[in-house]
Structures are given as structure tokens and as C-alpha cells.
Image (cartoon, helix red, strand yellow):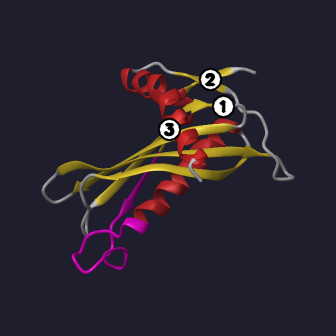
Amino acid sequence: MEQVAMKHSKTIQTRLVLPPDTNHLDTIFGGKVLAYIDEIAALTAMKHANSAVVTASIDSVDFLSSAKVGDSLTLEAFVTYTGTSSMEVYVKVTAHDLIKNEEKLTTESFLTMVAVNEFGKPQPVPKVFPETEEEIRLHTAAPKRKENRERRAALK
């Protein structure tokens, strides 16, 4: 199967944080951010696999800081590693205070998506290769994250 550059799957979305998206502290609900993360991970994986995908797991979500009403959120995602039919997708979320022109990283996450055919059965995906320093770092560490996922699954 062919190999494609990780940048091929890169997907970027921008969203505005509105009052219904926030809690009593006027910061965005974590669940809202999770929904955005799952959506962009699916789009990214579909772009890579050229097929439908399902979320197999949300491996980690680190909420590093919050976003407030009026901030724009930029979600950036790309496939960092692949198995036979699975894809590890990295998502980072940045909040931008458009009035103060200040940006901060709010969330980082890794998800595992699986490519499926029209019958819902897993199907093969292309391998990926890194080019940038960030891509190389994430790609190199991916087998360790996979090992952690397998260890976690064995505990069930």
C-alpha cells in the first residue's frame, strides 16, 4: 500500500465560542470541545483513508487552559500513525482572544479512528510519513502510545 505525507491529512477548523457553549464560569464546556475534537478527527481520518471512519477510542485529552465567550477556537488535526485499518489522529486546540490578540493552547488529544467499508468492516489505509519536526516527534512516539493503549485494553 502507498505511503502519504502526514500533511496530506491536515485539517483546520475555526469556531467561535458562544454563550450557549459555556458553563457558569463563562468558559467552554469540556464536552463541547470533545465533540469538536471527535468531528475534526473523523474528517482528518476520512481525508487520509478516502473512506468512512469510526472512532475506536479517544486515547487522551489534556485540557491545558480554557476558552471564554468571544474567543475563537482553532482546531488542527492530522494523522500521526497508521496500523492496518486504524489511524492515530493528533488534535490540538488553540484559543484566540480576538480583542487582546492573545493565543493559547487549550487542549491536546489523540484519537484512534478506524476506516470502514460500506458494510462497516475495517479496511486498509495508507501508511504515513513525517516531514516536519513536530510530525517526526509525534510519529516516533506513536508506537509507545499504541503500547499504552494495548496495556490499558488488557486491564479490562
Secondary structure of residue under mark 1: loop
Gap in angstroms between the C-alphas marked 2 and 1: 14 Å
User: At label 2, which amino acid type do we have?
Assistant: Val
Q: If you read the primary sequence from the N terminus, does the residue marked by circle 2 or circle 1 appear first? A: 2
Q: Is residue 78 magenta?
A: no
Q: Residue furthest right?
A: 119
Which label belongs to residue 141? none
Q: If you read the primary sequence from the N terminus, does the residue marked by circle 2 or circle 3 appear first? A: 2
User: At label 1, which amino acid type do we have?
Assistant: Gly
At a point 22% along the width and 49% down the height, the residue shown is 104
Taking the image as shown, residue 94 lies to the left or right of residue 11, namely: left
Q: Which residue is mark 2?
A: 4
Image position of 65 with respect to 77: above or below: below
Choose top left, top right, bottom left or bottom right for residue 45. Answer: top right
Magenta stretch in the rendered image: 12-31
Q: Which residue is mark 1?
A: 83
Residue 71 x, y percent position in the rendering: 26, 62
At a point 66% along the width and 20% down the height, the residue shown is 3
| Residue 52, visible in the rendered structure | yes
